[in-house]
Image: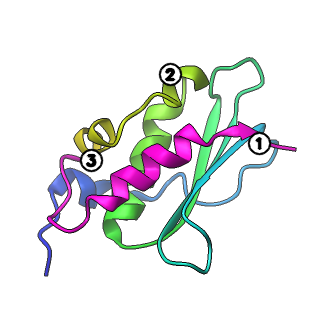
Amino acid sequence: MPTYPERLLVLFRSAAHGGDLPGATHFGQAGQPGGGPWIQFWFRAPDGVVEAARWRTFGCPAAIGCSEAVCVQAEGQALARLQAVTAAEVTEWVGGVPEGKEHCPELAAQALRECRPWE
């Protein structure tokens, strides 16, 4: 059984940003629902700065923790900056991921790179 860092577990248990975001202006996704692990982000950023962020994922505690960490970090940040976030940064935000879970911060970073206007 993997050993999860405390910071990641706090984010996993919180999941405060999980769910829908009415009025979202941007959406990003990595992975495909129904085809393994996936992460989706919605942001409300009418002027290019994130006012609110939400996520959905199908994955393990590491995927949930990475999703929550991205939303925590995103609020108040410029979308352009977020689209340059790397998997290493996401890994740092969660305090590390167990061996074999490196795909989780990569999915989160990829979903940020894929973020586009949402209609």
Whether residue 61 can be seen here: yes
Q: Residue at x 50, y 54 (%)?
A: 16
Give the mark nearer the N terminus: 3 vs 2.
2
Q: Is residue 74 magenta?
A: no
> Element at badge 1?
loop
Task: Give the CA distance from mark 3 to mark 2.
Answer: 18 Å
Q: Residue under label 1, please give it.
A: 24
Give the mark nearer the N terminus: 1 vs 3.
1
Where residue 78 sits: x, y (%)? 57, 20
Q: Residue at x 26, y 45 (%)?
A: 91
Q: Residue under label 2, please give it.
A: 81
Give the mark nearer the N terminus: 2 vs 1.
1
**Along the line of sight, which residue is nearer the eye, 82 or 64?**
82
The magenta span reads 94-119
For badge 2, the amino acid type reads Arg
Q: Is residue 19 left or right of residue 5?
A: right
